[in-house]
């Protein structure tokens, strides 16, 4: 449950997902090895990251229960692969951007639950430092024809990440409300996706968070107007106008429809009633 929006039945069924993930995918070259993802229905339905070594042996990069499957997040929207070193995420994101003609933007965050990191065998306490380094590493992969990066948590030599993103970069929108998230957005982000807790006053907290990021950006020598701000919650023209006034550039919508037809109808109504009347904001 995501208060105050309630719960709903997802139109994405297990059968639909299973039909789309029944074969090896995301084939790429990492150094002298070939990497790909492979469904493992006998291992809890996970998708394994596999590699073929130069001597011909094939083994998983990380053992069960590690799962590289990209989840569909129906509220907020974020995708991030915490291991190994953001390389898999960089490859998947670049391919998606290439196929969509440069329309991809990613919202990323470090998360707040130790259990998520324990599930993939990673330390929780250094997640912020690791995220900062991952951001630098994946941007090198997208930018350079042949990329090399050596850091504390990420290291690779002469790696290619093809197909490249259309603009040789993908906008990264940093999510969160902590001091670290605000600093990360101001220093490294292309945008910021603030998080306002349900028990907080939106019209007080949201402008404060946006102002803090803008001020931090100035402190890092960046122009605040280079950052894009995303938030959610507007369902009327009046609400959309308020978000624009406080500096929000993009609005996300929590879908309430329970079937694909209902979702389509809801999006059409929102386009007619709100989007068409606020394009100039």
Image (tube, helix red, strand yellow):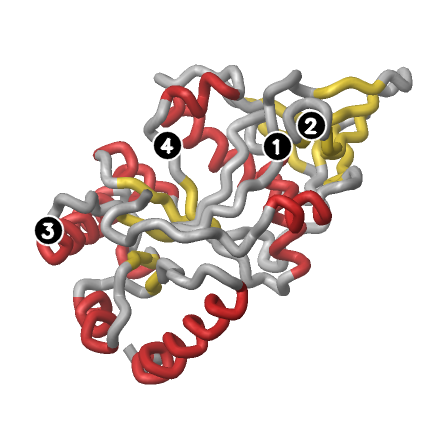
Give the crowd class for mark 1: few <14, some 14-19, many >=20 residues within 10 Å: many
Instruction: Name which of mark 1 and mark 4 comes first in the sequence.
Output: 1
Residue 48, numbered circle: 2
Q: Secondary structure at mark 4?
A: loop
Kindly identify which residue carries mark 1.
68
Residue 96, image x and y in percent? 63, 53
Location of the N terminus (image quadrant): top left
Question: What is the quadrant of residue 146 in the picture?
Answer: top right
Location of the C terminus (image quadrant): bottom left
Q: Secondary structure at mark 2?
A: strand
Q: Are marks 3 and 4 in contact (CB under 8 Å)?
A: no
Q: Are marks 1 and 2 in contact (CB under 8 Å)?
A: yes
Instruction: Name which of mark 1 and mark 2 comes first in the sequence.
Output: 2
Instruction: Name which of mark 1 and mark 3 comes first in the sequence.
Output: 1
Give the crowd class for mark 3: few <14, some 14-19, many >=20 residues within 10 Å: few
Q: Residue at x 78, y 38 (%)?
A: 24
Q: Residue at x 28, y 69 (%)?
A: 235
Kindly identify which residue carries mark 4.
111
Q: Are marks 3 and 2 in contact (CB under 8 Å)?
A: no
Left or right of residue 278, residue 90 in this image: right
Q: Secondary structure at mark 3?
A: loop
Compute the Cα span from label 1 to label 3: 37 Å
Q: Are marks 4 and 2 in contact (CB under 8 Å)?
A: no
Residue 130, image x and y in percent? 44, 25
Q: Residue at x 75, y 26 (%)?
A: 50
Residue 155, image x and y in percent? 59, 23
In this view, the residue farthest toward the right is 56
Left or right of residue 157, residue 239 in this image: left
Kindly identify which residue carries mark 3.
201
């Amino acid at each position: 449950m995501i208060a105050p929006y309630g719960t709903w039945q997802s139109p994405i069924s297990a059968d639909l997902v299973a039909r789309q993930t029944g074969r090896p995918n995301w084939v790429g070259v990492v150094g002298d090895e070939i990497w790909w993802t492979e469904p493992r229905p006998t291992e809890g339905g996970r998708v394994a990251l596999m590699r073929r070594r130069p001597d011909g042996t094939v083994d998983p990069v990380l053992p069960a229960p590690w799962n590289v499957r990209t989840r569909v997040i129906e509220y907020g929207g974020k995708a991030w692969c915490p291991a190994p070193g953001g390389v898999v995420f960089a490859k998947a994101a670049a391919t998606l951007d290439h196929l969509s003609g440069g329309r991809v933007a990613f919202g990323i965050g470090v998360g707040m639950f130790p259990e998520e990191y324990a599930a993939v065998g990673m330390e929780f306490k250094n997640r912020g430092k690791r995220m900062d380094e991952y951001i630098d590493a994946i941007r090198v992969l997208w930018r350079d024809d042949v990329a090399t990066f050596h850091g504390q948590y990420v290291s690779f030599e002469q790696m290619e990440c093809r197909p490249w993103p259309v603009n040789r970069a993908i906008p990264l929108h940093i999510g969160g409300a902590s001091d670290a998230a605000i600093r990360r957005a101001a220093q490294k982000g292309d945008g910021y996706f603030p998080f306002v807790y349900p028990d907080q006053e939106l019209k007080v907290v949201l402008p404060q968070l946006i102002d803090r990021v803008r001020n931090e950006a100035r402190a890092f020598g960046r122009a605040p107007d280079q950052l894009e701000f995303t938030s959610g919650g507007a369902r009327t023209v009046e609400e959309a106008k308020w978000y624009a006034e406080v500096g929000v550039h993009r609005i996300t919508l929590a879908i309430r429809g329970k079937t694909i037809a209902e979702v389509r109808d809801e999006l059409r109504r929102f386009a007619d009633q709100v989007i068409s009347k606020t394009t100039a904001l």
